[in-house]
Image: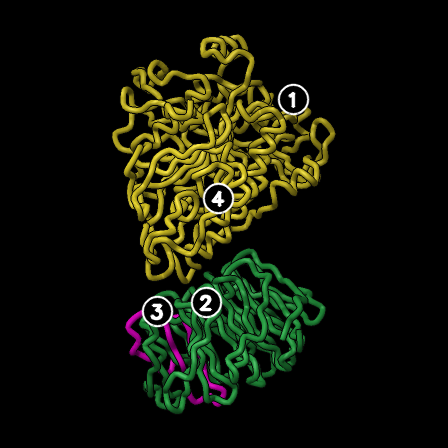
Amino acid sequence: MLNITGSGFELCDGLTRRSFLKIGGLAMGGLNLPQLLRAESENGLGSSHKSVIMVFLTGGPPHQDMVDLKPEAPVEYRGEFSPIRTNVDGIDFCEHLPLLAQRADRLAVIRTLVGSIGQHAAFQCLHGHPNRNQPPGGWPSFGSAISKLQGPVNREIPATVALQPKIGGAGWHDPGQPGFAGMAHAPFAPNASGTQDLVLDGMNLKALRNRHELLKRIDFLKTQLDTNDAINGMDTYYQQAFDILTSGRLAQALDFEQESPEVRERYGFGSTEPAGYGDAGWMRNEDFLVARRLVEAGARVVTLSYGRWDWHGQPHGTNFDNARDHLPGLDQSLSALMDDLKERGMEDDVSVLVWGEFGRTPKINKKGGRDHWPQVGCAMLAGGGIRAGQVIGATNARAEHAIARPVHFQEIFATLYHNLGFNVDTTTIDDLTGRPQYLVDHGKYQPLHELI
Amino acid sequence: MNAKLVHTFRHNNAVYSVAFSSDGKTLASGSLDKSIKLWSLPEGKELKRLLGHREAVCSVQFLPGDKKLLSASLDKSLRVWNLETGATEMTMAGHSTYLTSMAATSDGQYAVSGAQDNDAILWDVAGGKPVATLKGHTDFVNCVEISPDDSTIASAGYDMLVRLWSVETQKQVADLGPHEKPIQSVAFSPDGKLLAAGDDTFTITIWNLETKQKVTKLTGHRGSVKSLAFSHSGQVLASGSSDSTIHLWNPGTEELTGSLTGHRNSVYDLAWSPNDRWLASGAFDRTARVWKIVDGD
């Protein structure tokens, strides 16, 4: 990540910024415009810009307290919350999701998400492949794969942006790895910190106007670094990074303060403070708004994490204390995003996915918590032209396991790839040995036919 | 009886504890955000922020004279804070896992803490060291209190028993129960004759401490009873619940005399001002609130 420090500085287009601007990742598609246009043409995308916003509920959200309530289950299973009717007959949500309940006709609910390894590891929600026996270079995150396949929509906005905060558990704030897609396709991570950060001391946006100064400083930075894999590809996106930095368009997309008070109010307000105890990340509703701004500006994939959903119980609040704390914020921000996309005519072009790494134990533990439950979890999908207003899958009477239509993480990814115009049976990316790798396990997983 | 919301004080995370100073002009709030905040009353301005605990602050109590504050944290420690400087003057540690509750004697000389190691520890606050470990509970201790005459400790938790201990001998002298589910809160009446215990059956049981018999059960909450506090007059028992409400009860008539709504999550602590005109509450909705008690409807 490239950090440009400063305070109260002015953007290239004259906008005043109150906070530091962090330009990170330096990930651009590595494709020139003809290549980009050809890639889009080959994938039947034409001039339309399809994109994905993925919301990672870090820690594992409780499926049975959100979209798969079991009011007839014994008290030690069913929990504290009551179901409420949605605007789709036969589909109930938790009482703390009233806004989403009124938008259920625009949502597809997966009640039978399976395939979790039971660990707090973001990769499950970032590429969905097993983390063992990975191909040389490792699996690229979904955003990195898309960046590799499609490149950026324009030269000013990276193809994939990860808004994960720099605070929080390592397994949760992972912005996604580029894997064998290559460093040039690493998600652009404006909120992250890590070893990939590159800091240009003393630079601000005013100074960036001086192209020679910028190049001089980048040259100096390069001399400070070893020639290793971490910076391979630097030359490739050298110019592209400069375009990002100097255009101001990315800075504008990241700056949610440019939105009207009414829009911001609709999304609600979050915080960059830890959302819970321990290794919690933040719970910032504004990230949903930034995600919309980014896809509107040209990003193909935007990921964000929201809150801390690992609710084992007292003394850090019961599962239900924490759910009462988190669900209203998710309800508001996700509903606002759905409405915003619809009103802007973007709903069919932008797929929104909300999920976590696993579900939670059907039986409430003695501390009022629910523990990890990789057997089954949940996901919500909206937009992207899917057939919404339906539930896929069913669990047993205590929400312990799938009894109908289990859905693997990779089937969700297959659906997203489909929504972006890719045929998972034919599309491959070469790994570091040059061997073509399918986007999801070939022949095993397909897009969800119920949705497409 | 009714109450009007006067102040809403915000933390970055759940508020687990509230306490008034002896002059009623300052409220302390302890939070899952690891901080303690001091608020001026009646103005409602943040006076000071005490930082140092490494985990949630589960209990706060002003020491006599209001120049020092005693706090307890899930980080397994108790701290004495100098409120002029905001510095920690003393730290005491002894539990092996999460410390969940703390209460101090009226003279501030002793304190007792309960923890998820199933123990309660009696502390010599002035000396900064443990006096004794009170062993007997067979499961997590959720709540501890000290009687108004400073003679008796009550502790309770997941083993569903209220255990009474002598401060002087540090021996268990009685137990009350068992309750049907884990006990989340206890409170002594000001005359020391009654003990209220709230549990996960959503019920408050009133125990007679002389006969060790149940006096009555107060029902009405729709969630676990997380917090209890008798007014100094003894005429009102306030209860806070995971149903997000605060109920006001007449312990003599067992009548529900008022219900305070506004919190959006479990009410984890309650405290009366010295003159009983104000009630403070701390909740998982990241706020501490101050309510002005109004007689009548």
What chain is the green one? B
Mark 2 crowd level (few <14, some 14–19, many ≥20, 10 Å Cα) = many
In the image, residue A202 sits, relative to residue A421, either above or below, namely below
Secondary structure at badge 3 equals: loop
Considering depth in this image, is A4 or A314 the residue closer to the camera? Answer: A314
The amino acid at mark 2 is Ser
Instruction: Kindly indicate the quadrant of the structure image that contains residue A407.
Output: top left
Q: How far across and down, in percent of the image, does residue A227 sit?
A: 42, 25
Residue placed at 70% from the left, 27% from the top? Answer: A12
What chain is the yellow one? A
Are labels 1 and 3 on one chain? no
Frontmost of labels 3 and 2 is 3
Q: Which mark is residue B181?
A: 3
Residue beneath disc 4: A85
Q: Residue A211 carries which label?
A: 1
**Image coloring type:** by chain
The amino acid at mark 1 is Arg
Residue beneath disc 2: B73
